[in-house]
Image (spheres, helix red, strand yellow):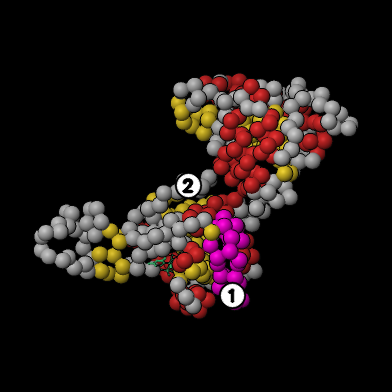
Amino acid sequence: MELTGKRLVQGVTGGIAAYKAAELTRLLVKQGAEVQVAMTEGASHFVTATTFQALSGRPVFTDQWDQRMANAMAHIDLSRQADLIVIAPASADFLARVANGLADDLLATLVLARDCPLLMAPAMNRQMWENPATRRNVARLQADGVGLLGPACGEQACGEIGVGRMLEPEDILDAVLAFFTPKLLAGKKVLLTAGPTFEAIDPVRGITNLSSGRMGYALARAAQQAGAEVTLVCGPVALPTPAGVTRIDVRSALDMQAAVMARAAASDIFIAVAAVADYRVAQTAEHKLKKDEGGLPLLELVENPDILAGVAALENGPFCVGFAAESHNLEAYAQAKRQKKNVPLVVGNLIQDGFGGDDNRLILVDDHGAHPLPPASKATLARQLIEHIAHLMESR
Ligand code: PMT
């Protein structure tokens, strides 16, 4: 749980996206955060306080004159107890009130009285977002150091299409996780590969493997949250791109090699998580192979280039991290791969743990020996691996 011990105030204001705010509360609590919800009167027209009370396990504050605090100063106490205030959704009216320093209800008052950072996820009709008055308010909030998350572009509740949708709760959670992540890779450029490659046999068939891309995506997200500028070169996978990450889609090992080599020299760190096909078909058939023509087809294979070894061989190249997926003798094979590819760190995982799924178990093999990490989610392991890489780079 990444937010254990963190105290958050989640503010909910009046807008149809308020129904998604309940999911955000659930996600924050699931990550271990203590979440205190405060709602505006407008929000209570869309969702009830009972929903948030049930999800957060705490009574919800809605009223500036709430008598539950012994000192009758809910606005001071709630903001002093928080490490972060997140307003989701933040309506156009609420942005305007905060931008102008108004304190005309409990939520606006506690925001004005805060001594902790403030993140806001705006949600409104596209014309309201584009209105010069909202533009002025947004500029003022940014100048005041308020973090704005989104809004996203897409179909709106009113049926119009444009910018103004609240970010999805998972994306707001990511921003909160990023907020609390130490910026160990600030200023660094990280290049990663992820997923399988697909080596075409004919226009519809090919050789591939069961890599889902999850481990590589988790690492891309963790590196971005640690402050790095991240580029992810990935084979065919069906995962949403992590926020703030530049994604380059490729298909074959040769495509992946070209995309990586074009960027490797300008990167500080290269992490090769992809399960790259060792071989490709020498001659891809132009037309679909027919079963009843010419008997059993014989596929001639040729070896693919080793992308990781190629990057590791660059003069003044990036700090290289390889992965090894093995069915047995994990530490010995990981060590052998580290020497063969001449990289400072190889991360071993068993194929039954690593491929597909959300969890994994890793062993980190470097100059100092082998460091096993206990089984955990790929997100947690990714964060631990990024920390390990940052420390190794620091000590070089
Ligand atoms: O995507 P998931 O479902 O989450 O699964 C994650 C994973 C199991 C695929 C991942 O954790 C992993 O172990 N990836 C490496 C798979 C592997 O066994 O690679 P390898 O032994 O073929 O290669 C060793 C290293 O060289 C890897 O870093 C690989 O990316 C790299 N390599 C290999 C061949 C090649 N032609 N070019 C390379 O860069």
Amino acid, disc 1: Ala
The quadrant holding residue 124 is top right
- Rendering coords of residue 272 (x, y %): 46, 63
**Quadrant location, ligand no. 1:** bottom left
Residue 370 - label: 1
- Rendering coords of residue 298 (x, y %): 18, 68
The quadrant holding residue 289 is bottom left
11 sits to left or right of 222: right
- The residue depicted at 45 percent of the width and 77 percent of the height is 340
Q: Are marks 2 and 1 in contact (CB under 8 Å)?
A: no
Q: Which residue is mark 2?
A: 241
- The residue depicted at 74 percent of the width and 38 percent of the height is 58
Does the magenta segment cover residue 286? Answer: no
Does the magenta segment cover residue 365? Answer: yes
176 sits to left or right of 276: right
Amino acid, disc 2: Thr
Magenta stretch: give its range.
Answer: 360-385
Q: Would you say the magenta stretch is mainly helix, strand or loop?
A: strand
In the image, 41 versus 136, the foreground residue is 41
- Rendering coords of residue 209 (x, y %): 37, 61
Q: Quadrant of the C terminus?
A: bottom right
Compared to 301, does 70 lie above or below?
Answer: above
Compared to 10, does 233 lie above or below?
Answer: below
Q: Secondary structure at mark 2?
A: loop
State whether residue 320 appears in this view: no
- The residue depicted at 61 percent of the width and 66 percent of the height is 374
